[in-house]
Image (cartoon, rainbow, N blue to C red):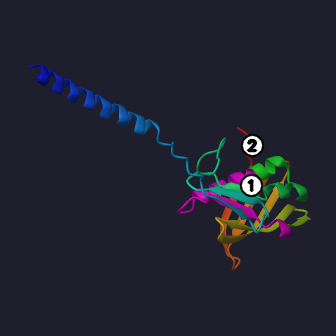
Amino acid sequence: MQSANKRRLLIILGVILLLVIGVVALLSKPPKKPSTPQITTYTDPYSHETVTDVAGKAPDTYGSTATTPIYLGFDKLLDHGMTFDQVGNLKVAFDNFSKKQPKPIQQVSIDVDHITAEHDTSGFFLFFNVMADRQYVYKAKVDYTGLSAIRLYLSDSKGNLTYDSQTVNTQVGE
């Protein structure tokens, strides 16, 4: 009987020893290092702004809806006579244009090197090329009056009108 008890005790000690060795082996494994996300940068040829794309991460859209495009080069319109509210309303016009597309536009970029301004008795106008989603190019005409109202006209490369925003005069920031 004593030898049977000793044998059971040895088996129990052997199992406990195997469990301890297994736990030690698992705990001594070095932790996996988190993989560094793939980061690519892109210099937009129209606005000359650098866009950083992080693989697996959506663009930062804090303060705006998820479908609102990223706007590049729009600050340069301030140098050509538009007010802050007019630039904001121009973004609203592009957002409305984006919503009418089969797939919402994610990026709108202004050719900042070729913005031209004109004015006559009917108002002030800016002309420039704009690129949507790094591939679709439109000719833009912006009619702006007062301190906030704008009207955006977009034409294709052949000069055919593809979009007329009508007058946009919202309160920016509401």
| Type of amino acid at the residue the image marks with label 2 | Val
Q: Quadrant of the C terminus?
A: top right
Quick one: label 1, few (<14), some, or many (20+) residues within 10 Å? many
Viewer-closest of 91 and 1: 1
Depth check, front residue: 45 or 23: 23
Quarter of the image for residue 143 reads bottom right
Camera sees residue 148 = no
Residue named by callout 1: 90
Left or right: 117 in relation to 143: right
- Nearer-the-camera pick, 161 or 104: 104
Which residue corresponds to the image point at 67% horizontal and 41% vertical from the top-left?
A: 63
Most extreme residue toward the bottom, as rendered? 158
The x, y position of residue 103, in whole percent, is 54, 61
Residue 60 position, x and y percent, is 65, 47
Q: Which residue is mark 2?
A: 172
Residue type indicated by callout 1: Leu
Up the image or down, 85 lies above or below 77; here it is above
Instruction: Examine the structure image and report whether residue 107 is included in the region drawn in magenta.
Output: yes
Describe the element under mark 1 as helix, strand or loop.
helix
Distance from disc 2 to disc 1, alpha carbons, whole Å, reads 10 Å
Q: Residue at x 29, y 28 (%)?
A: 16
**SS assignment at label 2:** loop
Tag 1 or tag 2, which sits nearer the N-term? 1
Seen in the image, is 142 located left or right of residue 80?
left
Q: Residues within 10 Å of mark 2 (few under 14, many from 20)?
A: some
Q: Which portion, as a residue range, is magenta?
A: 89-114
